[in-house]
């Protein structure tokens, strides 16, 4: 059995109100509807935003386990893994999203973040911008992708620039910057 629209709406309204009660509310709903992947996804998002990464990962993973075709949950789990400096794990998590249509916003976001992993910043920016243009259903995710575009703009070397001498790659620097920020899921 899954949570009804009214209770889900109340949970979303509680989260948008910013009172800090959303996690407790989500947990009460999960107790009543333990097989509702959406509730585990939201709980994971709330936990990630409150700096509890181990619990957040467990909740996001459970959401994907309960509903493997819950594409947004799968994307966010991979994004969480990427920003936790686990790019190989993120790529594996995103692999089933390859079945989405090429013009789906999540396909573009995955392509862009895959380019990011390989320090291909112009391609990252291009794919993320196309994904943002195609995404009308999740504006908070567009803001997360816009932050990455902003960071990539400053990391892309000019075409004739010499290779950087730094030991850390630009991607590891970017992930370190993003890892300290809460994302909106």
Image (cartoon, rainbow, N blue to C red):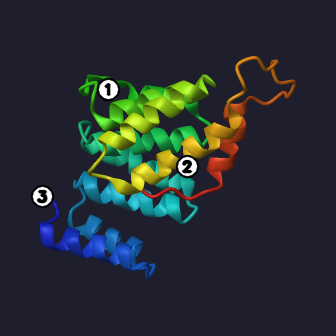
> Which residue, given by chain and number where applicable, does mark 2 sit on?
147
Q: Estimate how packed mark 1 is, as few (under 14), some (14 to 19) or many (20 or more) residues with alpha carbons within 10 Å.
A: some
Residue 146 in the figure: left or right of residue 95: right
- Name the residue: 82% across, 24% down: 164
Question: For the residues marked 1 and 3, what is the alpha-carbon distance in whole angstroms?
Answer: 25 Å
Residue 59 in the figure: left or right of residue 182: left
Q: Where, quadrant-wise, is the N terminus in this rendering?
A: bottom left
The disc placed on residue 96 is 1
Where is residue 122 shown, x and y percent of the image?
Answer: 57, 27
Q: Is residue 43 above or below residue 104?
A: below
In terms of sequence position, does the residue under pointer 1 or pointer 2 come before the other? Answer: 1
- Name the residue: 26% across, 51% down: 137
Q: Where, quadrant-wise, is the C terminus in this rendering?
A: bottom left
- Name the residue: 63% across, 49% down: 179
Q: Estimate how packed mark 3 is, as few (under 14), some (14 to 19) or many (20 or more) residues with alpha carbons within 10 Å.
A: few
The disc placed on residue 1 is 3
């Amino acid at each position: 059995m899954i949570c009804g629209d009214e209770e889900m709406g109340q949970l979303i309204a509680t989260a948008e109100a910013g009172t800090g009660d959303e996690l407790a509310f989500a947990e009460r709903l999960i107790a009543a509807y333990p097989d509702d992947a959406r509730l585990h996804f939201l709980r994971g998002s709330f936990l990630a935003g409150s700096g509890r990464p181990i619990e957040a990962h467990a909740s996001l993973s459970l959401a994907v386990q309960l509903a493997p075709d819950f594409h947004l949950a799968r994307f966010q789990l991979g994004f969480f893994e990427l920003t936790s400096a686990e790019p190989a794990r993120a790529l594996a998590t995103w692999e089933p999203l390859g079945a989405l249509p090429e013009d789906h916003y999540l396909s573009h976001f995955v392509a862009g973040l895959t380019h990011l992993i390989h320090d291909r910043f112009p391609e990252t920016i291009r794919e993320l911008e196309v994904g943002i243009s195609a995404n009308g259903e999740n504006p908070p995710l567009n803001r997360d992708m816009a932050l990455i575009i902003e960071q990539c703009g400053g990391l892309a070397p000019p075409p004739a620039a010499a290779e950087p001498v730094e030991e850390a790659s630009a991607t590891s620097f970017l992930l370190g910057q993003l890892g300290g920020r809460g994302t909106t899921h």
